[in-house]
Image (cartoon, grey):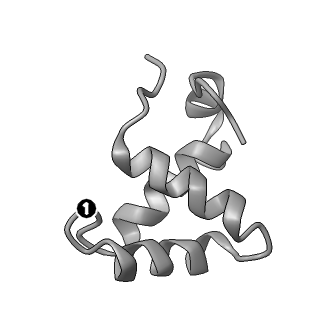
Amino acid sequence: MPFKPTSKNKLAREAINQFPELSKNALAEYLSDSYPALFKDKEAARSIIRNITGSNGEFNRKNIKNPI
């Protein structure tokens, strides 16, 4: 089942495009600090970033709607 764009996905995609030099960990920390109401912790943000970038396993890589 492909990912549907949500506000979390949209914010994560914007952060990835805005800061392409940052690691996934640093991006996750930025998102969780900037949007604590949406991302309960750094790990929740990192999980979304990994899904978007295709770093979450072969099954998820095949089901990404708009990979970065």
Rendered residue at 49%/79% (across/down): 30
Q: Position of residue 1 (x, y in %)?
A: 43, 16
In the displayed structure, 26 sits above or below 5; it is below
Tell me: 54 left or right of 28: right
Judged from the image, the secondary structure of the residue bearing numbered disc 1 is: loop
Q: Quadrant of residue 45?
A: bottom left
Q: Position of residue 28 (x, y in %)?
A: 49, 72
Query: Label 1: which residue?
Result: 38
Quadrant containing the C terminus is top right
Rendered residue at 58%/56% (across/down): 14
The residue carrying pointer 1 sits among few (fewer than 14), some (14 to 19) or many (20 or more) residues within 10 Å by Cα, namely some
Q: Quadrant of residue 3?
A: top left
Q: Position of residue 56 (x, y in %)?
A: 58, 46
Q: Quadrant of residue 31?
A: bottom left
Rendered residue at 48%/20% (across/down): 2
Query: In front: 28, or 10?
Result: 10
Q: Residue furthest top?
A: 1
In the displayed structure, 21 sits above or below 15; it is below
Q: Amino acid at mark 1?
A: Leu
In the displayed structure, 29 sits above or below 17; it is below
Q: Position of residue 27 (x, y in %)?
A: 57, 73
Rendered residue at 66%/42% (across/down): 54
Tell me: 49 left or right of 47: right
> Could you tell me how many numbered marks the image carries?
1
Query: In front: 42, or 8?
Result: 8
